[in-house]
Image: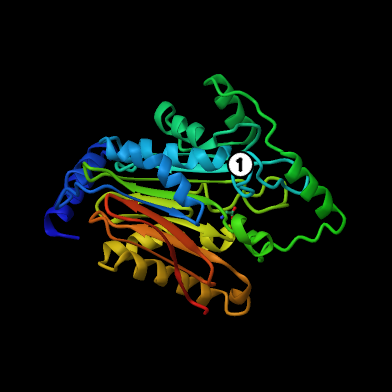
Amino acid sequence: MNIKRRELIKAALLAGVAGPMSAALAQTKRTINKNPVLISTWNYGRKANAVAWPILEKGGSSLDAVEAGVKLAEADPNARTVGYGGLPDREGKVTLDACIMDSRFNCGAVLCLEQIMHPISVARMVMERTPHIYLTGEGALQFALANGFKKTNLLTPESEADYIEWLKTSNYKPEKNIENRLGGELNHDTIGMLALDNTGNLSGACTTSGMAYKMRGRVGDSPIIGSGLYVDNGAGAATASGVGEEIIRIAGAHLVVGYMEQGLSPENACRKAVEKIVKINPDKSRDLQVGFIALAPSGAYGGYSIQPGFTYAVKSGTKEEVFKAKSFYR
Ligand code: GLY
């Protein structure tokens, strides 16, 4: 952290007011990056980036871009771990978790939301229209309906058929990430997207139907600010995919951003967080998959995962590419 930024934080803390502190932090960026960048989890992020990119290209905000991008995955019945078509919990209900965070520490989230196609947009409304950050279950649904969202059956025939098949054994192994089973085109998990816009502002969004056949009421990392997603405009942004319990245990996204604040590159920051999960799970880390991606205020980006196979998609003015993340195990 440079001296000017530290002084601004100190002044804001002494003033004892959160709003001006956020504004002060937002003013401290050293250079304004005029070159927007998008990074999203998994191969699937490429399509989401393609929806978000025109917003950034036209000078739109990183917040608008990440919301629009992840909505594509939420509405896609073939995205079996996100939104519509997501695999249900053990009671056969599709329950959704999502959060969003902007460049000024504003954030909002919904947990265990049912029957709403776009939980990320509800999360944004929680952020923008309420004094709160988290709304859960029935309350989140009431809020969504009161704000114009319509109820939709999110359980597609394909997901219902998979669920009925699963019921035959009810074999619940949360350590095994869903992509191990689905493979191929469906080889992805939570969609997390980070964006840097042409005013130098970072935002992020993260949305999922969570772990397939989870216990009813289970919430993973994805809607938890600091676990599935964190944005600090002066330091960077990070989001996570994989076994949520392990990401929550280390407050993963916040940890990655903290490492970036200490000067680590996005990839090294993600690697350090992965190493921490492996360290605290000496016996089961071989069965765990967690991946992080991160984006720095400079536009530098990176990712890292426990197991091979984690991918992330990047889009900028000069690049459109899906990268295989380096991993702890080969
Ligand atoms: N990372 C998504 C979940 O664990 O629910």
119 or 38: nearer the viewer: 38
- The image position of residue 295, as x and y in percent, is 33, 56
Q: Is mark 1 within 8 Å of ligand 1?
A: no
- The image position of residue 192, as x and y in percent, is 47, 50
Q: Considering only vertical position in the picture, is 153 above or below 167? A: above
| Most distant residue in the left direction | 4
| Most distant residue in the right direction | 168
Bin the neighbour count of mark 1 within 10 Å (Cα to Cα): few under 14, some 14-19, many 20 and up. many
Residue placed at 69% from the left, 41% from the top? 94
Residue 86: image quadrant is top right
Number of numbered markers: 1
Location of the N terminus (image quadrant):
bottom left
Q: Relative to 279, is 296 on the left or the right?
A: left
Q: Relative to 148, is 88 on the left or the right?
A: right
Please, what is the three-letter code of the amino acid marked with disc 1? Leu
298 or 283: nearer the viewer: 298
- The image position of residue 253, as x and y in percent, is 42, 57
For label 1, the SS is strand
Q: Considering only vertical position in the picture, is 190 above or below 62? A: below
Q: Considering only vertical position in the picture, is 262 above or below 140? A: below
Whether residue 218 appears in this view of the structure is yes
Residue placed at 30% from the left, 63% from the top? 260
Whether residue 106 appears in this view of the structure is no
Question: On the image, numbered disc 1 is attached to which residue?
Answer: 96
Residue placed at 46% from the left, 38% from the top? 133
Residue 257: image quadrant is bottom left
Q: Relative to 8, is 215 on the left or the right?
A: right
Q: Relative to 11, is 219 on the left or the right?
A: right
Quarter of the rendered structure image containing ligand 1: bottom right
Display colour scheme: rainbow
Q: Considering only vertical position in the picture, is 152 above or below 297? A: above
